[in-house]
């Protein structure tokens, strides 16, 4: 059984990015610049944005952070997005989710210039993903594909089950896994209203759990020899930790791992790769690979 180490893989990729950035700078190009917009003081969001800034440093990028309090108006946030859209120094930017309830998330996402949408959430990037056209892919599915490829997981013709149908993970993951250029697998998507989920999961050669329910996948749901990718990152109370919580995946790791040919842990699996793929998208934006700058 192989542990799919996302942290080690992300470190390798960040070194590859840093080497390419130095070549760009030495040839006269500017350093890629990623900006992040953070609203409020949610602990998870604070951590994610901090890690993204640290990743920028590791990759040799410039980074900037725009902060707002929870009471920022939607108009103020949209004005900030407009400034970042027009700022030629910024190659890509993200608006960290979740947003306060009084702000329309979809309106915010659609306000971002799709050429700077390195999260891959804009409808143009979502549509191009579905069509298999070059674009900024959603970072988590992109990171999962990169892990599968770098660990030489055979995908062509395999049966893949995706647990979850979110716009950020489940839907783009299923699209990418069925496309010939990426996963080239036969895909089944299961969600909260699916019947016989355990039966579906037991047929999977590759099981991608992104349902957001800690410990949902148990040993009786996994076929011996399957590859299991755990996307779950739910904070659960843990009095033994200084923080008072721990991260739990969607998979009961200890009981499922012995059955698998390969499995990704939580933490240290998909999470580091998500941030790393954001760096790859920013590099692509700086180079104008998918869209003219």
Image: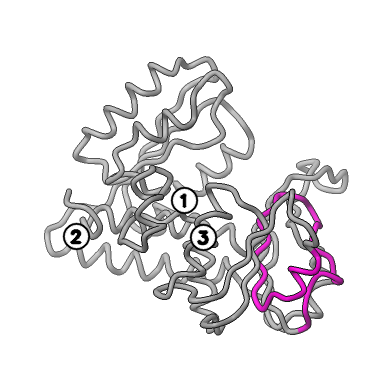
Reply above or below: 85 against 278: above
Provide the residue designation for mark 3.
141
Q: Where 105 sits versus 75, above or below? A: below
Q: Is residue 171 left or right of residue 88?
A: right
- Closest to the camera, between mark 3 and mark 2, is 3
The residue under label 2 is 25
Which one is earlier in the sequence, the residue at label 1 or at label 2? 2
Disc 1 to disc 2, C-alpha distance = 20 Å
In this view, 65 is above or below 117 = above
Q: Nearer the viewer, residue 162 or 48?
A: 162
Residue 231 falls in image quadrant = bottom right
Mark linked to residue 54 = 1
In the rendered image, residue 37, in percent from the top left (x then y), is placed at 43, 33
Question: Which residue is depicted at the point 47% across and 65% down?
Answer: 176
Is 106 placed above or below 15 here? above
| Badge 1 element | helix
Query: According to the image, what is the colour scheme of the structure?
Result: one colour
- The quarter of the picture where the N terminus appears is bottom right
- Indicate yes or no whether the magenta region holds residue 208: yes
Write down the region rendered in magenta.
Answer: 198-224
Residue 125 as seen in the image, left or right of residue 263: left
Q: Secondary structure at mark 3?
A: helix
Q: Residues within 10 Å of mark 2 (few under 14, many from 20)?
A: few
Residue 139 in the image: x percent, y percent? Answer: 47, 55
């Amino acid at each position: 059984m192989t542990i799919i180490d996302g942290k080690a893989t992300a470190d390798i990729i960040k070194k590859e990015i840093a080497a390419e950035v130095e070549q760009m700078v030495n040839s006269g190009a500017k350093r890629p610049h990623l900006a992040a917009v953070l609203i409020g003081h949610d602990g998870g969001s604070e951590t994610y944005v901090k890690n993204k800034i640290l990743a920028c440093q590791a990759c040799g990028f410039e980074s900037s952070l725009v902060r707002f309090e929870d009471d920022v108006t939607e108009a103020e946030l949209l004005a900030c997005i407009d400034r970042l859209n027009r700022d030629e120094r910024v190659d890509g930017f993200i608006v960290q989710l979740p947003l306060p309830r009084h702000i329309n998330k979809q309106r915010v996402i659609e306000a971002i210039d799709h050429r700077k949408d390195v999260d891959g959430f804009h409808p143009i990037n979502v549509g191009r993903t579905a069509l298999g056209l070059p674009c900024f892919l959603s970072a988590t599915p992109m990171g999962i594909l990169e892990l599968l490829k770098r660990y030489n997981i055979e995908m062509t013709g395999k049966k893949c089950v995706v647990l979850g149908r979110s716009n950020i993970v489940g839907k783009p993951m299923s699209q990418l896994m069925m496309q010939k250029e990426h996963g080239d697998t036969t895909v089944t998507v299961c969600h909260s209203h699916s019947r016989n989920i355990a039966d579906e999961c037991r047929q999977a050669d590759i099981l991608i759990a992104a349902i957001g329910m800690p410990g949902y996948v148990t040993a009786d749901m996994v076929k011996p020899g399957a590859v299991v990718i755990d996307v779950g990152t739910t904070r659960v109370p843990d009095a033994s930790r200084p923080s008072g919580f721990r991260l739990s995946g969607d998979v009961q790791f200890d009981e499922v791992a012995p059955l698998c040919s390969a499995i990704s842990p939580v933490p240290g699996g998909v999470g580091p790769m998500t941030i790393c793929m954001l760096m790859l998208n920013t590099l692509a934006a700086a180079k104008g690979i998918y869209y003219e700058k």
